[in-house]
Image (tube, rainbow, N blue to C red):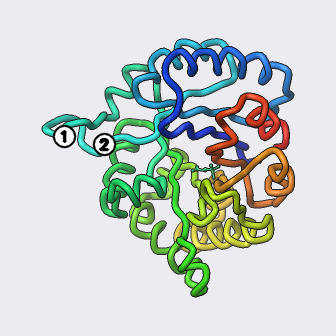
Amino acid sequence: MRTKIVAGNWKLNYDKKTTNKFIESLKKSVDKLPLNNTRVIIAPTFVNLSSAVEKVEKSNIEVVAQNMHQATSGAFTGEISADMLKAVGVNTVILGHSERRTYFNETDQALAEKVNTILEKGMETIFCFGELLEDRKSDNHFEVVESQLKNALFHLEAKDWKSIILAYEPVWAIGTGETASPEQAQEMHAFIRSIIEKKYNKEVAEKVSILYGGSVKPANAEEIFSKPDVDGGLIGGAALKVDDFTAIIAAI
Ligand code: PGA
């Protein structure tokens, strides 16, 4: 059985005080849920990771980072390394979010390097990818997704995939209020699994958790999560309210 995951990507939101208050409150509501096989994850900003890790102690909530530099050290002003994250108790990193690709020019090549660093350091990644609106309109979405995965992940060996969580996030659905229909999500997730099976084998394809991201909210979470190849969600806006995030976790 694949691990289910609900992850909240906080982006550029919440200072230390709000982060800590949020975690206190989320702990209480998550405690009441039957989590079974579900991982609950939040991704606060870098400066609040350390205190957030302390705050989630003895709870079912995990703290992950929103990004990481591929180099282990050096002249990269403003960047954060894998070891720095590990030193504050963070072992999982979101990579390749469309906002990083769009606003910070992250390329597939840079992402392949980041993924390599993740593996070298014994860490795990939630790897994001997805097509633009024009790709979908021109019926190019499968090709785009396949090339994103090929360029950044298909150099890995089968054994490396235990450290990879995928997050399919059609860019046109991120923060827009527009969601891929459950059928569109399922169709893409099944396609992703099929190309992984072709490249590797059935075991790798069946084991990897594939999250859907893009305007998931309490009202649509259950239907999206009910699809057989959707193993959870990467949540932006709706992860910023404890009640909404809890309702989404409860929907899985
Ligand atoms: P959204 O963001 O839920 O606000 O659309 C999702 C994401 O960016 O991961």
Image check: 213 left or right of 242? left
**Label annotation for residue 69:** 2
Image check: 246 left or right of 210? right
Instruction: Name the residue at the left extreme.
Output: 75
Question: Which amino acid is tagged 2?
Answer: His
Q: Which of 212 and 132 is in front in this view?
A: 132
Q: Nearer the viewer, residue 183 or 216?
A: 216
Asked if the residue at tag 2 contacts the one at tag 1, i.e. Cβ–Cβ closer than 8 Å, the answer is: yes
Q: Residue 26: x, y in percent?
A: 71, 22
Quarter of image, res 212: bottom right
Q: Is mark 1 on a helix, strand or loop?
A: loop
Q: Earlier in the sequence, mark 1 or mark 2?
A: 2
- The vertical placement of 176 against 139, above or below, is above
Residue at the spot x=61%, y=83% of the render?
Answer: 137
Image check: 226 left or right of 156? right
Q: Identify the residue under disc 1.
A: 76
Quarter of image, res 62: top right
**Label annotation for residue 127:** none
Q: How far apart are marks 1 and 2 (CA)?
A: 8 Å
- The vertical placement of 218 against 143, above or below, is above
Residue at the spot x=41%, y=42% of the render?
Answer: 67
Q: Residue 109: x, y in percent?
A: 31, 62
Q: Residue 21: x, y in percent?
A: 63, 15
Q: What element carries label 2?
A: loop
Residue at the spot x=39%, y=68% of the render?
Answer: 151
Question: Which amino acid is tagged 1?
Answer: Phe
The answer to whether residue 195 is seen in the rendering is yes
